[in-house]
Amino acid sequence: MGESGSGKSTVLRAISGLNPDWSGRITVLGRQQGPKREKAFYKNVQMVFQDPYASLHPRHTVDRVLNEPLDIHGIGDKEERIRAILDDVGLGPSFRFRYPHQLSGGQRQRVAIARALILEPRILLLDEPTSALDVSVQAEILNLLNRLKRERRLTYILVSHDLAVIAHMCERLAVMNAGSIVEEMSVDQLRRAAPEKDYTRQLLQASLGYDRETVRHFTRYD
Amino acid sequence: MTGNSLLSEKPLLEVEDLHVRFHTRTRIVEAVRGVSFSMGREKVGIVGESGSGKTITGRSILRLVRPPGEVRAKRIEFDGIDLLGLSDQEFRRIRGKRITMVMQDPKYSLNPVMKIGKQVMEAYRLHTGASRRQARQKALEMLEAVRIRDPERVFNAYPHEVSGGMGQRIMIAMMLIPEPDLIIADEPTSALDVTVQMQVLAIMDDLVSQRGMGMLFISHDLNLVASFCDRVIIMYAGRIVETCRASELHNARHPYTRGLLASLPRIDAPVAELPVLKRREEWKTDRIDHDLIR
Ligand SMILES: Nc1ncnc2c1ncn2[C@@H]1O[C@H](COP(=O)(O)OP(=O)(O)OP(=O)(O)O)[C@@H](O)[C@H]1O
Ligand SMILES: Nc1ncnc2c1ncn2[C@@H]1O[C@H](COP(=O)(O)OP(=O)(O)OP(=O)(O)O)[C@@H](O)[C@H]1O
Ligand SMILES: [Mg+2]
Ligand SMILES: [Mg+2]
């Protein structure tokens, strides 16, 4: 978590290879990464983006969206995999030949998750996966992500503005400000609202809801 | 909140039996089906899931529903004025002056080929007839008030050169400049991060409490509405299913409202699995009022 522009998406994009212009060290499953990712990397690491409307090609059916990664990686049992993954994300076979405009926001996000999972990766990078969705749809997607995490023993890095979502989904939390991590804490600490830094305290207060007096004391930390 | 005094006050806005339908090629969409409520110079929230009719309700009040949309109502009255009886020309003296609206998507509401500063200045000059110099001063002040960090740069930028969150704050600045009696704000802070969101809400809150502005606040953020507003309207499938005091939202009784609240994860009460909503046919027809919202 962190204020807008603090660098959360940029970190995920650097890990996933979408942003080649970084320095430092990134090690994934014991392998140190260079600026470019090998094809095999994406069998282990996949990303789900915030906006379910922008992340699917408008003229590709669900079937085509799911076939693409399998073709790229030369995977055989396509039929079986597509059927299984649609079932896993709670979309029946009737969704298979639909276009994005024929899906609701929650259904699109399920397709995006299915696309990320069809290669059976071990790490999922989730950039605000439910912030564009209704709370009732959010609950379905979070339940789905938690079930898949349990069943497949996945690792998630989740970006969210919603502390309750973070507390529900995560074990540990890193707080970003102006391009760096300023504090790390356990979700227990988060639940007890016991941060060490004033910046984090202000962020926690702001996410608890509106309070005129609290706002009066807000300061800038950049 | 001294809720009872609000009830004795003459309402600022009264809406009675509002219906909106769209004739599409394949079917008729009943977007709003008999919405009635009234409000004073206070903050009233409208919540409900996507497609429940929140935006169309707001747009209907300002006569902004375009064909093939068809709006019918028994009564829409603003500060004693019968809005349904006004000519389009008379309506223009109300819209953008006494009632303003912050649109859900600011990118579509700003003029893409005019610099932002000029648009904000024009909003002010139209309202006050001030000189260009005064208007420029005021525009910069307003941009600063909505926590834009570099007002001079934004003043000279075009809409496509600013982020979604900046666009929202620019729209809010423009809609507050005419000092309206009523502001209809449709998801006005959804692209802002939490700290900036609270600061921008505080500006509007102060206008409500100090100048007696009324505010209709459309949002799907239940916790935000519960903490920010005075009263809340909950919509489902084009209808109001429940109304209550905002501070009482967490004790709401309607199963739809309860279902929405239950589906939210909570910091203080961890659960293994979140309850999901199971929709029921009767939600399309019943309504619970805890508060005499009409
Ligand atoms: N392609 C780009 N070119 C130039 N600057 C960029 C680019 N992408 C990101 N930035 C800048 O990098 C910083 C971090 O951006 P980033 O998108 O990672 O923020 P974030 O923490 O994800 O914010 P949000 O909560 O708004 O999504 C910001 O100042 C942003 O303007
Ligand atoms: N021009 C139109 N033609 C046909 N149907 C429309 C049109 N505009 C809106 N609708 C329908 O009217 C209903 C209410 O829409 P509205 O925009 O008011 O929803 P909302 O509650 O604001 O949702 P959201 O939270 O997604 O903004 C929806 O079912 C929508 O699809
Ligand atoms: Mg981001
Ligand atoms: Mg809307």
Image (cartoon, rainbow, N blue to C red):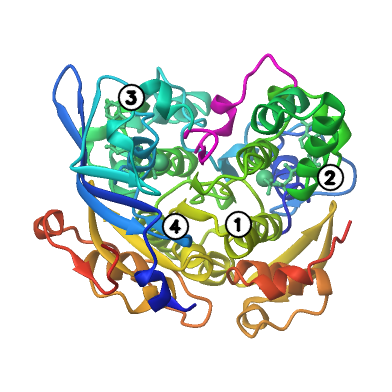
Name the front one of labels 3 and 1: 1
Ligand 4: give its quadrant.
top left
Furthest toward the front, the residue is B80
The reply to whether residue A12 is visible in this rendering is yes
Circle 1 is placed at which residue position? Answer: A160
Quarter of the image where one finds residue B153: top right
Task: Decide whether residue A160 is among the magenta residues.
Answer: no
Q: Amino acid at mark 1?
A: Ser
Q: Which mark is residue B149?
A: 2
Q: Which quarter shows the C terminus of chain B?
A: bottom left
Q: Amino acid at mark 3?
A: Tyr
Do the residues under discs 3 and 1 have CB atoms within 8 angstroms? no
Q: In the rendered image of this protein, does residue B146 appear above or below residue B24?
A: below
Q: Which mark is residue B204?
A: none
| Marked residue chain, label 2 | B
Q: Which mark is residue A145?
A: 4
Q: Is mark 1 within 8 Å of ligand 1?
A: no
Helix, strand or loop for disc 2: loop
Tell me how far mark 3 sits from mark 2, CA to CA: 41 Å
Name the front one of labels 4 and 3: 3
Helix, strand or loop for disc 1: loop
| Marked residue chain, label 3 | A
Q: Is mark 2 within 8 Å of ligand 1?
A: no
A49 or B30: nearer the viewer: B30
Q: Which mark is residue A99?
A: 3
Crowding around mark 4 (Cα neighbors within 10 Å: few <14, some 14 to 19, many 20+) is: some
Image coordinates of residue B220 in percent, x first then y, are 43, 54
Quarter of the image where one finds residue B40: bottom left
